[in-house]
Image (cartoon, rainbow, N blue to C red):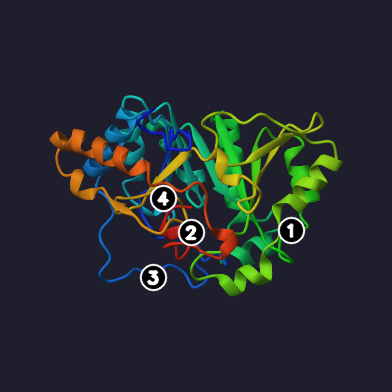
């Protein structure tokens, strides 16, 4: 068995690392009142600690890394983190998820540091709707940054949109117009219940499979899933340059293809986004000679990963909101 494999035969070549829990947006489904730091909060992992963490995971077979938050660009040393991560032997794909507020200003800097894939959160193509969802009227600048990434031939450019009933769930025609001539992927993500959003979830949850049915009826075709891909079921259509992905966590067997682990900004290993516990790795990131102990600790925890989440039962684990873990 691979060191990064569990008792159900799933392998985990993909790590999502949050580098900061803070976010500068106020998205209705995540941080509607904005981010408020706890005065007693522990500082995020340092650059040295991040380097040691990544060496431990690559030692065990991880080769795809996604930098997340909060909003990773809130962290002033983001470029140096990207440069350091890109230099770790074994990492072949360095991705980041961002709200795109600094994309048009920092894209080339990030690419020079080694970034080769980016997901940008764009919950609506309508300016007013985007502002209502995020709390910021920044859509035009963010989409300009996305176009810059496409023109710069960044190998993978994707957009993320959380589906919200009676808010943005009728925008498929606008998205199809957007995708017709752009070689880009958009991921429609089903709203998930977290620890603090139950009333919002009940009001705005819509099954992503409804959208999937519309795509199939319009001639879109399901593509095979790559071994290190995220959780989206991806569709293509011969008349469109872009592709559409559906992330439906409430669908049957969603967790069967799980291939990723998560580490929070303070160094806790999360075996599942909605797990009941975190495993503190930070004590094992204090010196270079702790690598063997770190690898042993990670490997010893993989067997505790559950076969699936418990969202259908309303159990959201210790995740109060998505920014707390990195989504």
Would residue 257 be visible to someone looking at this image? Answer: yes
Mark 3 vs mark 4, foreground winner is 3
Could you tell me if the residues under marks 3 and 1 are in contact, i.e. CB atoms within 8 Å? no
Could you tell me if the residues under marks 3 and 2 are in contact, i.e. CB atoms within 8 Å? no
Mark 4 vs mark 2, foreground winner is 2
Which one is earlier in the sequence, the residue at label 3 or at label 4?
Answer: 3
Which one is earlier in the sequence, the residue at label 3 or at label 2?
Answer: 3
Label 4 sits on residue? 73
Q: Secondary structure at mark 2?
A: helix
Which one is earlier in the sequence, the residue at label 4 or at label 2?
Answer: 4
Q: Residue at x 39, y 31 (%)?
A: 62
Q: Secondary structure at mark 3?
A: loop
- Where's residue 267, x and y in %? 29, 50
Q: CA distance from mark 4 to mark 2?
A: 16 Å
Foreground residue among 79 and 4: 4
Which one is earlier in the sequence, the residue at label 2 or at label 1?
Answer: 1
Label 2 sits on residue? 322
Mark 3 vs mark 2, foreground winner is 2
Label 3 sits on residue? 36
Judge from the rendering whether residue 223 lies leftward or rightward of residue 284; answer left or right.
right
Q: Secondary structure at mark 4?
A: helix
Mark 2, Cα crowd under 10 Å, few <14 / some 14-19 / many 20+, is many
Judge from the rendering whether residue 281 lies leftward or rightward of residue 128; answer left or right.
left
């Amino acid at each position: 068995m691979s060191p990064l494999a569990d008792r159900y035969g799933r392998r985990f070549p993909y790590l999502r690392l949050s580098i900061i829990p803070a976010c500068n947006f106020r998205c209705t489904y995540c941080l509607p009142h904005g981010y408020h730091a706890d005065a007693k909060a522990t500082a995020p992992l340092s650059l040295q600690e991040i380097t040691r963490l990544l060496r431990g995971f690559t030692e065990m077979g991880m080769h795809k890394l996604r930098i997340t938050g909060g909003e990773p660009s809130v962290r002033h040393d983001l470029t140096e983190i990207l440069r350091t991560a890109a230099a770790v032997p074994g990492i072949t794909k360095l991705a980041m998820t961002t709200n795109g507020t600094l994309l048009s200003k920092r894209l080339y800097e990030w690419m020079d540091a080694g970034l080769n894939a980016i997901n940008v959160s764009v919950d609506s193509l309508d300016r007013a709707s985007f502002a209502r969802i995020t709390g910021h009227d920044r859509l035009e600048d963010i989409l300009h940054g996305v176009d810059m990434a496409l023109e710069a031939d960044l190998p993978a450019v994707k957009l993320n949109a959380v589906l919200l009933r009676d808010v943005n769930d009728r925008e498929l025609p606008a998205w199809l117009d957007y995708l017709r001539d752009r070689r880009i992927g958009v991921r429609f993500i089903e709203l998930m219940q977290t620890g603090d959003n139950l009333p919002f979830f009940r009001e705005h949850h819509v099954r992503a499979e409804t959208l999937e049915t519309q795509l199939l009826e319009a001639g879109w075709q399901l593509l095979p899933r790559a071994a290190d891909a995220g959780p989206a079921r991806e569709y293509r259509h011969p008349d469109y340059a872009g592709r559409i992905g559906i992330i439906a966590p409430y669908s049957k067997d969603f967790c069967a293809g799980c291939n990723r682990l998560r580490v929070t900004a303070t160094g806790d290993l999360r075996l599942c986004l909605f797990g009941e516990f975190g495993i503190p790795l930070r004590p094992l990131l204090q010196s270079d000679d702790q690598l063997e102990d770190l690898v042993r600790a990670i490997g010893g925890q993989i067997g505790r990963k559950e076969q699936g989440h418990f969202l259908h039962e309303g159990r959201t684990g210790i995740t109060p909101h998505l920014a707390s873990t990195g989504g």
